[in-house]
Amino acid sequence: MARQLTGDVAFAGANHLGESVVWDDRSGELVWIDIHRGKLERWRADSGRATVDLGERIGAVGLRTAPGFVAAFATGFALLGADAETEQTLSTVEEHLESTRLNDGKVDRQGRFICGGMDEGDPQRPLSAVYRLDPGGEVHRILDGIACANSIAFSPDGTRMYFTDMPTGQILVYDYDTDEGVPHSPRVFVDGSEHPGLPDGSTVDAEGCLWNARWGAGAVIRYTPDGAVDTVVRVPAANPTCPAFGGHDLSTLFVTSARFGRTAEQLADEPLAGAVFAVDPGTPGVVEPRFAG
């Protein structure tokens, strides 16, 4: 039987669509975004919480080798400096598609940024793609026909890439060519029947297990490398969005959440929707890689 845990509130505050949480091991800082409000949130134990208004919707961020962040804005990629101000715009994507935006991304173990998009149309269509941003700024399309990219994560050795096209309910695992930065040989890792909700953001721990936020189910699930459910973390918000390991020893699992899409009646029953939660999962994470550009 799966182990049951409960997440506590780490940071109250109603993020509309909190996402893309990451721990900066150099600065001892937790970073996450509020997608539709175009904000980057930062917290440090010695200075508290600070919010940066980016002026544009943002889908994902990653750490850089240089101070600052690599960012996937709704319309393309950019580099942010240490103060989170835009330092350099690198590339726009999908300019011909009015209903798509970039949505979910992670830095691979070799320092490239892998990021996928989504269609915001109704009905949602598989119009978008997954891209690889190389350190030199070149953008390569590596997966096509995507409705809503999510759950991008890499095994500790970098040879497996996890990914979901969220509406399918399935999490796939790919063999990942670490030299070329190309996923291949996909197979079903989780078929969606083992737990309610849809697969949202993911991260991996030091044992190679995948932690996946279950949108609509108020839970984060730990899957073993063979896809078995190992642990269920309950949070007091229906829509958790993304987990990440943090703290000085990477022993805390932080989980962002969303108010987006909830009715007034639902939010009355979920006053903590949009908060960041935390739990001691019993297994540490791994240090997040940094974009080499």
Image (tube, rainbow, N blue to C red):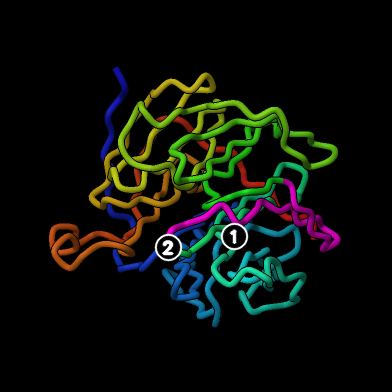
Q: Which residue corresponds to the image point at 57% horizontal and 65% vertical from the top-left?
A: 100
Q: Which residue corresponds to the image point at 31% horizontal and 41% vertical from the top-left?
A: 219
Q: Which residue corresponds to the image point at 49% horizontal and 67% vertical from the top-left?
A: 42
Residue type at the position of mark 1 = Ser
Answer few, some or many: residues within 10 Å of disc 2's Cα (few below 14, many 20 plus, some between 14 and 19). Answer: few
- Residue 24 lies, with reference to residue 225, above or below; the image says below
Apparent side of residue 61 relative to residue 182 in the rendered image (left or right): left
User: Separation of disc 2 and disc 1 at Cα?
Assistant: 41 Å
Answer few, some or many: residues within 10 Å of disc 1's Cα (few below 14, many 20 plus, some between 14 and 19). Answer: few
Q: Which residues are magenta?
A: 122-142
Nearer to us in this view, 152 or 127: 127
- Residue 239 lies, with reference to residue 73, above or below; the image says above
Regarding mark 1 in the picture, which secondary structure is present there?
Answer: loop
**Relative image position of residue 244 (x, y in whole percent):** 49, 47
Regarding mark 2 in the picture, which secondary structure is present there?
Answer: loop
Nearer to us in this view, 127 or 153: 127
Apparent side of residue 269 relative to residue 52 in the rendered image (left or right): left
The residue wearing badge 2 is 122
Asked if residue 259 lies in the magenta stretch, the reply is: no
- Quadrant housing residue 293: bottom right
The residue wearing badge 1 is 27
Query: Which part of the image, by quadrant, shows the N terminus?
Result: top left
Residue type at the position of mark 2 = Asp
**Relative image position of residue 157 (x, y in whole percent):** 69, 30
Nearer to us in this view, 119 or 102: 119
- Quadrant housing residue 262: bottom left
Q: Which residue corresponds to the image point at 38% horizontal and 34% vertical from the top-left?
A: 221
